[in-house]
Amino acid sequence: MRLFNTLTRREEEFAPARHGTVRMYTCGLTVYARGHIGNFRTFVCMDVLRRSLKYVAGWDMHHVVNFTDVDDKTIAGAEREQLSLRAYTDRHIDAFFEDAEALGLERVEDMPRATDPENLQAMADVIGALDERGHTYRSDGSIYFKISTFPEYGKLARLDHAGIQVGARVDADSYTKEDARDFVLWKATKPNEPTWDYGVGAGRPGWHIECSAMALRLLGEAPIDIHAGGVDLIFPHHENEIAQSEGATGRQFSRFWVHVEHLLVDDRKMSKSLGNVYSLQDVRDRGHRISALRYLLLSAHYRKQLNFTWTGLEQAEEALRRLTDLLVRLKTVRGGEPHAEIAQRVNEARRAFDTALGSDLNIAAGLAAMFDLVRAINSAIDLKQLGEADAALVAAAFEHFDKVLGILSLRRAEDEQPAVPVPEIEHMMEQRQAARRRRDFAEADRVRQALADRGVLLEDSPQGTRWKRK
Ligand code: AMP
Ligand code: ZN
């Protein structure tokens, strides 16, 4: 398996350091809002990486994806809505799980929350180790990492050392690129902020220390194998994680660093602060299916920016349909002799797919191998040159592709569930009936169309109205 390593800026051969198990950490969602499809581009791409490591390379995974449930934004959000931090972040965590399931993300081995006591303790322990090794100082009750004590600071982001402001402090959780300053590890208690005391003084963690501590606690001895996130995290977040983790342990933190490029809208980064975000529900409301979104998000190379458009989503839907159409067609093949050239063609496609995924997740090439096979098999069926045994081989190959891509299984799961929850369908059917009774046919039509737009068709008959999936 070859992977591009941001640390070396080169594609390198990857294998886990220990026992055939990949120890991987992905920076998860900051739970102050519902995740948008930009966030989910990163999570979908990392899901495909995870699945490739498992089903193409054959390794076991110990994969950690955290929730950042305490930082400037979550605290401000809880305050605004007059909720406890837990209650506020719980809501967004529930929403994440719902969206993750809708997108077919495999459950990872650990999803820690920063504010769980064992994680806060681990943060305090890392800070204690940094203290002992002379990497910290205190100011106004907060503890800072002194970057001048870590000469390798900047090695991930390749910072120009002239841009490093030795001795200048920042205690906000987000600040601008190219502005390397001593960063806060533990913030002194402030009015209206949650506060904990785990032996480094009362206060709360800075954002960066959360990930270092959770990665080291859950994945065991450094170095871990892979650390991942979106490209916006390279600096300062990941640079600071390296400084903290390597400063505390004296060992390399992560062997590989993998970063996913941004999802853009109209050529600007999709981000909550720019307000140009779409949620999964926005995608559904426009009549699209989340399996098509998953297809779109994974179809571009993860190291290239992807500009989101509704046309692109329609094209993804069409491509996905070509796959499902073939699978339906395969089931119609009965009897017939097996053909050696079909078996060979299937094996070639499997090899090409695995090679593509093993080449720094070259999904475009993997999809090309799949669609070449789709064309070949469609014409073999047209020419009656596909036997039932051949069809089974082809179906098994698509099962394999889909273990990695997770689109066909997701579509199947969607097909088993109406796009609109049944109680909501029933409620809307009653609304439509009521409108018809008062002869408001425009309203009745509107309700019918609203359901149709979401993939549910109503059929009237003398026995009454029934709904079915489009
Ligand atoms: P956040 O909740 O802001 O901490 O982001 C969670 C994850 O989503 C991080 O790995 C970010 O790098 C990633 N992310 C944020 N915006 C985008 C975007 N527009 N495209 C791709 N990934 C993103
Ligand atoms: Zn992180």
Image (spheres, rainbow, N blue to C red):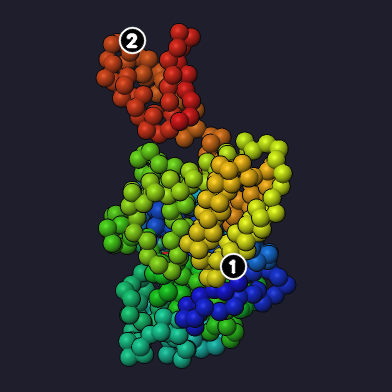
User: Which residue is under mark 2?
Assistant: 437
Residue 51 in picture, x, y percent from top left: 60, 60
Residue drawn at (32%, 87%) of the image: 163
User: Which residue is under mark 1?
Assistant: 355
Looking at the rendered structure, the secondary structure element under dot 2 is: helix
Answer whether residue 193 is visible to the viewer in this image: no
Residue drawn at (66%, 55%) of the image: 341
Quadrant of the picture in which ligand 1 is shown: bottom left
- Which of disc 2 and disc 1 is earlier in sequence? 1
Query: Which one is in front, 93 or 382?
Result: 382
Q: Looking at the picture, does residue 55 appear above or below residue 324?
A: below
Residue 157 in picture, x, y percent from top left: 41, 80
User: Mark 1 against mark 2, which lies toward the viewer?
Assistant: 1
Q: Residue furthest top?
A: 462
In the image, 325: left or right of 23? left
Looking at the rendered structure, the secondary structure element under dot 1 is: helix
Residue 104 in picture, x, y percent from top left: 54, 49
Q: Residue furthest front?
A: 383
The picture quadrant where one finds residue 381 is top right
Q: Which mark is residue 421?
A: none
Query: Which one is in front, 107 or 332?
Result: 332
Q: What residue type is labelled 2?
A: Arg
Circle 2 crowding by C-alpha within 10 Å: few under 14, some 14–19, many from 20: few
